[in-house]
Image: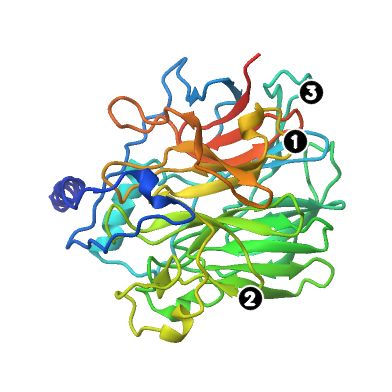
Amino acid sequence: MVNLRFALAAALALTLLSACGEVAKLPVEAGMGPAPQLPPPNTTLIPTVNTAKAVGWKPGAQPQPADGLTVTAFAAGLDHPRWLYVLPNGDVLVAETNAPPKPEDAPGGIKQWAAGLVMKRAGAKTDSANRITLLRDADHDGVAETRTTLLEGLNSPFGMALVGNQLYVANADAVVRFPFEPGQTRITAPGVKVTDLPAGLNHHWTKNLIASPDGSRLYVSVGSNSNVGENGMDIEEGRAAIWELDVASGQKRLYATGLRNPVGMAWAPDGKTLWTAVNERDELGSDLVPDYMTSVRDGGFYGWPYSYFGQHVDTRVQPPRPDLVAQAIVPDYALGPHTASLGLAWSGGTTLPEPYAHGMFVGQHGSWNRDPRSGYKVIFVPFDQNQPGGPAKDVLTGFLDENGQAQGRPVGVAIDKQGGLLVADDVGNVVWRVAAKP
């Protein structure tokens, strides 16, 4: 009887959450670009919950490419593929991964319980495969004919980078390295821990990394442990930040802070400017706050949790820090409210048509806190030299079906050695490949 009552209460709570909240007054595009519209916050007793139910792709179904492009399944039947890394020989690594278990002493309550229901509906409440799979397309036909388990038994792995003959992997709690030579299909040597990473509650568990162009440093992204510090700032130590890690010594330092959940990272064409895609805060209404991508300044502070998009103060955060708000850097380019922009890849080397030759591809995982939904697509932001130079273009859409259910959700993006765009889809369990139409 207790279990039945709990199940009924859970169903009722999810129904109420789905029915409550407010509706956007602005189109998503109003929250995009270098100067997005930022209306007053619209908070409600119960936040907007509008999650797309994860259903997967029906046989023969696939996302819709933009005009002049085609899409094929590079690899299917994967287990929650989240992130991609292309090796020098053209092999593709995919992290099949999900969140680690929550610690027993994690803050709970009705809000956390309800969040778990939302995650389950969105397809994010699955056990982590904890492996990195190697995909090989030896005949260059756009389909991987070889699939092997490169590494297994990891701890929610995400970011990957090859420096020399060492493959670095960002687990949820540490950066580890393995001896590796391109061409290998299996690593049997034990990993060596390079440095610990902030772990624990892991509200945002995805730890990404990217190597500097000369390979001497790694940059490691670590998301916050909360929405806006509601669990206390002591558990945010070293989080909402990008760390710089010296490869030779293993020493690290904070490179940039106040980034709520930086995930994708890429180098601009100058090879000197690091860019990141950041998920901003929730529960200020469907029109706030836009996610963004920005160049990252050494020592820069980007506002979280005290302010957003520069000096726009979040009054929910107590005590306030006007001293830090005054230092907050305005991001370069907004990507729309609640789009969950995760993937980021510079277009260098692409063989896609001219409109996609110079800029950033962005994988937008999709909203839960906006009505109507936003994201659930891959976009392209054109650049003029080293800065965004125009409105974003849709590259891959159709991840939501006619009933608003998620057939797939795009995450990591990467350019393969033949110049195609690879997209990891963690609901459809596919890596898609976008190419120019013949």
Q: Is residue 141 left or right of residue 284?
A: right
Residue 27 percent across, percent down from the top left? 32, 44
Image: 89 above or below 151: above
Going by the numbered disc 1, the residue's amino acid type is Gly
- The numbered disc on residue 169 is none
How many numbered callouts?
A: 3
Residue bearing mark 2: 299
Residue nearer the viewer, 382 or 244: 382
Callout 2 secondary element: loop
Residue at mark 3 to residue at mark 2: CA–CA distance: 43 Å
| Residue 80 in view in this figure | no
The residue at the point 24 percent across, 48 percent down is 25
The residue at the point 57 percent across, 60 percent down is 172
The quarter of the picture where residue 262 lies is: bottom right
The residue at the point 30 percent across, 74 percent down is 316
Going by the numbered disc 2, the residue's amino acid type is Gly
Q: Is residue 98 left or right of residue 115?
A: right
Mark 1 or mark 3: whose residue is earlier in sequence: 3
Going by the numbered disc 3, the residue's amino acid type is Ala
Q: Quadrant of the C terminus?
A: top right
Residue bearing mark 3: 138
Residue bearing mark 1: 349
What's the image's color scheme? rainbow
Callout 3 secondary element: loop
